[in-house]
Amino acid sequence: MKYTKIKFFSLLSAFILVVLMLIVGVYASGHTINIKGNIRFEISDSSLFVKDIRISQGVTGFETIKDFIPGFVNEEFDLDLGQINSATGVVVIELEMINTTTTIYEASTSSTVPNANISVSGTIKGEQVPIEEVLDYTGNSGIITLTITPQSSTAVDINLDGLVITMSESQNVEVTLKGDYLDAYVIGEGSTEIIYKEADQEVIYVPVGTKICVACIGASPNLENWEIDWGTLNQFPMQSGGLEPDPDRLELWLNGEIIDVYYLTWSLSGAYVLVDAVIEVTGACTIEIQLEPG
């Protein structure tokens, strides 16, 4: 995965500052962790809007920061996180973002802080939400996650001053997976990780040239023995033999056009076997599998 790093502004605007002023008292395993400091964003403009900032509450999930005021990343956020309970001692902060451009961003950091390990991750989709609509926008373009793990089990202070979140322009493209009969997919030739689609439509980001195998898995097939033919592109498996009258059929769609059809063969139990297809991503696209009753 390749990224194009965004250059600094001039000395007067080298970093767009988001002041988090974190003051967190985390009680875990009998010790207290205090976290405070300023977090800065390295980004080329003020295109990203911070809709919400949440902090983990242990087993109870996330809660919005008290008195948080949304704004673009070049504005200051005066935050008081108060005290939280954490069963693990790990502090997780989520920044919910809205993107007013078409640029896809990846969040990361190379910064280090005393007394703790810190990681930053998140993909921000290029949704190009109009600036005048950001306050009323009900969704989000992505979430930046900060995970802070103390290096000591004793009482410790963690200062985030100097932490820089780098927003890099991603070289990935957007792939939309949709269809009631698209059940699972595998990303990348040779991969064995099967990902079940959790909704009627999902959006993923992959480099150009990535192969994605999408599958209609029918009724409880043995996915452990799923053998993918990565060399056959943009079509379902070949069929042979006769077909029953008016069979149901699977339709494979790419960018709004049917590119192949598979006529379902039903077993005595009334179930059909796993059917898959491999698509090579050449750009932003939509892949869809639909069932057309016979």
Image (cartoon, rainbow, N blue to C red):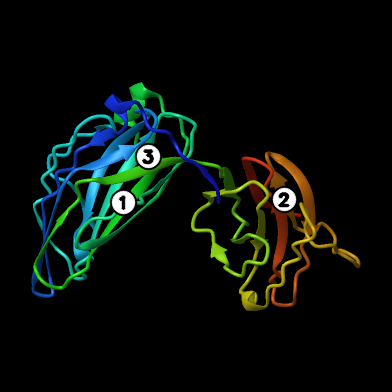
Task: For marks 1 and 3, give the CA distance.
Answer: 30 Å
Residue 45 quadrant = top left
Q: Earlier in the sequence, mark 2 or mark 1?
A: 1
Q: Given this view, does label 2 or label 1 mark the residue nearer the observer?
A: 1
Q: Can you see residue 292?
A: no
Q: Is residue 92 left or right of residue 169?
A: left
Q: Position of residue 101 (x, y in %)?
A: 45, 29
Q: Can you see residue 56?
A: yes
Which residue is found at the position 59% from the left and 61% from the top?
A: 183
Which residue is found at the position 37% from the left and 43% from the top?
A: 166
Q: Which residue is mark 3?
A: 139
Which residue is found at the position 74% from the left and 77% from the top?
A: 268
Q: As shown in the figure, which amino acid type bears the numbered disc 1?
A: Ser
Say whether marks 2 and 3 touch (CB < 8 Å).
no
Q: Position of residue 20 (x, y in %)?
A: 18, 42
104 is higher (above) or lower (below) than 288: above
Q: Is residue 149 left or right of residue 199?
A: left
Q: As shown in the figure, which amino acid type bears the numbered disc 3?
A: Gly
Say whether marks 1 and 3 touch (CB < 8 Å).
no
86 is higher (above) or lower (below) than 1: below
Task: For marks 2 and 1, give the CA distance.
Answer: 45 Å
- How many residues crowd around disc 1 within 10 Å: few (fewer than 14), some, or many (20 or more)? some
Residue 10 quadrant = top left
Q: Position of residue 79 (x, y in %)?
A: 14, 42
Say whether marks 2 and 1 touch (CB < 8 Å).
no
Location of the C terminus by quadrant is bottom right
Residue 256 quadrant = top right
Q: Which residue is mark 2?
A: 252
Q: As shown in the figure, which amino acid type bears the numbered disc 2?
A: Leu
Q: Given this view, does label 1 or label 3 mark the residue nearer the observer?
A: 1
Task: For marks 2 and 3, give the CA distance.
Answer: 29 Å
- How many residues crowd around disc 3 within 10 Å: few (fewer than 14), some, or many (20 or more)? few
